[in-house]
Amino acid sequence: QVQLVESGGGLVQAGGSLRLSCVASGRTETTYVMGWFRQAPGKEREFVAYIVRSSGNEYYADSVKGRFTISRDNARNTVYLQMNSLKPEDTAVYYCAARRIAMATYEYWGQGTQVTVSS
């Protein structure tokens, strides 16, 4: 089992920045791919970014490319999401997720952290 705990959400004005953190515990050796997702009110959950724990390879949704940066600190079992140039449409609950690299779907999820961007 893997437990994920997000932090760093809050209220920010448009154009501002936030950094989200996700700390993994438990069988972290299995958390080969760490991802961030978000869900806005009345909308389906959507992919934001992922990073491969071993290689550091990253991938982003087009909607956040160039504004968000995902990174990891393997020694701390922590993944970050640096969010810059925030827009009101980035408002959502942000979730951290983890999966083994061979799995197609994410197996573990955090409880989420609210990000609200005011115009």
Image (spheres, rainbow, N blue to C red):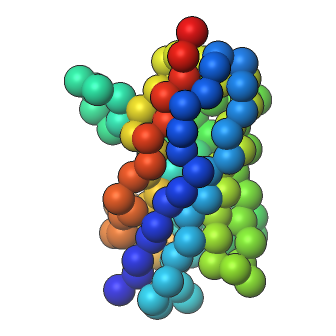
Residue found 55% across the figure and 88% down from its top: 29
User: Is the residue 100 above or below the residue 56 in the image?
Assistant: below
Residue 100 visible from this viewpoint: yes
Location of the N terminus by quadrant is bottom left
Instruction: Name the residue furthest front.
Output: 11
User: Would you place residue 105 above or below residue 17 in this image?
Assistant: below
Q: In this figure, what is the number of numbered marks?
A: 0
Question: Percent x, y for residue 76?
Answer: 69, 80
Name which quarter of the figure residue 108 lies in. Answer: bottom left
Could you tell me which residue is drawn at 55 percent across and 31 percent down?
11
Q: Position of residue 54 (x, y in %)?
A: 70, 76
- Taking 111 as reference, is 116 above or below it? above
Residue at 41% of width from left, 81% of height from top? Answer: 2
Q: Nearer the viewer, residue 90 or 55?
A: 90
In the rendered image, the vertical position of residue 61 relative to residue 112, given as above or below: above
Residue 45, given in percent of the width and then of the height, sits at 33, 38
Between 12 and 41, the residue placed more toward the observer is 12
**Left or right, 69 with reference to 88:** right
Q: Is residue 28 left or right of residue 43?
A: right
The quarter of the image holding the C terminus is top right
Q: Quadrant of residue 83?
A: top right
Spot occupied by residue 73 in the image (x, y as percentages of width and height)? 74, 72
Q: Is residue 31 left or right of residue 81?
A: left
Quarter of the image where one finds residue 114? top left
At x 58% / y 51%, what residue is drawn? 8
